[in-house]
Amino acid sequence: MEITYRDFVEGDRYEVGKLAEQMIEYWEVIDDFKLLSKGEGYVEKWWQITDKRLKDHEYKFVVAETNQKVVGFCLGVVEKEEEVSTMDFLDIKKIKVGDIVDICTDKEYRGLGVGSKLMDMVEAYLKKQGCDYLWLQVMETNEKARQIYLKRGYKNRLVSMMKKID
């Protein structure tokens, strides 16, 4: 099985949307609080947010494909400085940050290095754009992804905690 990697094109929209649906379905399973759900019109809403990001940012949006089927995607954007420094009362070092916004590999193709290759492409682009740092968000319960990111050199910086009040 040959997997090719390339930039996203509009013709990929349907299949990327199906992968975005797989992504939220997985999050529904691993969310300890069960607060996330796909909801009505999820894919359309996901595309609205994604289209806005593509319009408002420098970006790299890549897909993995085999047998004319998209089996993975990764989107990274260069954050605007004001999006990085939101605490006006602190003296925050000015940095240029790349954000790995979304990454998803079809469940049938996980463990084959597809996500790693997609991330390599996006990280290389963000580095070329002069980003000083890369960030991403991952659910604490997504242990497999967290371990992959740690191996890639990402480090925990902020921890968000939650408690249900009984």
Image: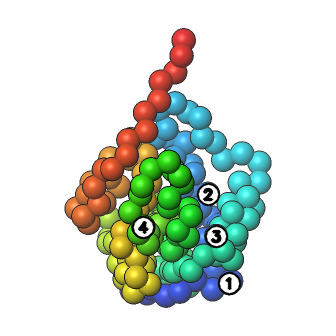
Marks 4 and 1, how far apart at CA:
38 Å
Marks 3 and 4, how far apart at CA:
21 Å
Secondary structure under tag 1 reads helix
Mark 4 Cα shell of 10 Å, populated few (<14), some (14-19), many (≥20) = few
Locate residue 53, reporting x and y percent.
Answer: 64, 70
Q: Amino acid at mark 3?
A: Arg
- Looking at the image, tell me whether mark 4 or mark 2 is earlier in sequence order: 2
Secondary structure under tag 4 reads loop
Q: Amino acid at mark 2?
A: Glu
Mark 3 Cα shell of 10 Å, populated few (<14), some (14-19), many (≥20) = some
Residue 36 visible somewhere in the drawing:
yes
Residue to which mark 3 is pinned: 53
Q: Residue at point 47% right, 30% down?
A: 162
Mark 1 Cα shell of 10 Å, populated few (<14), some (14-19), many (≥20) = few
Residue to which mark 1 is pinned: 11
Locate residue 67, reporting x and y percent.
Answer: 51, 84
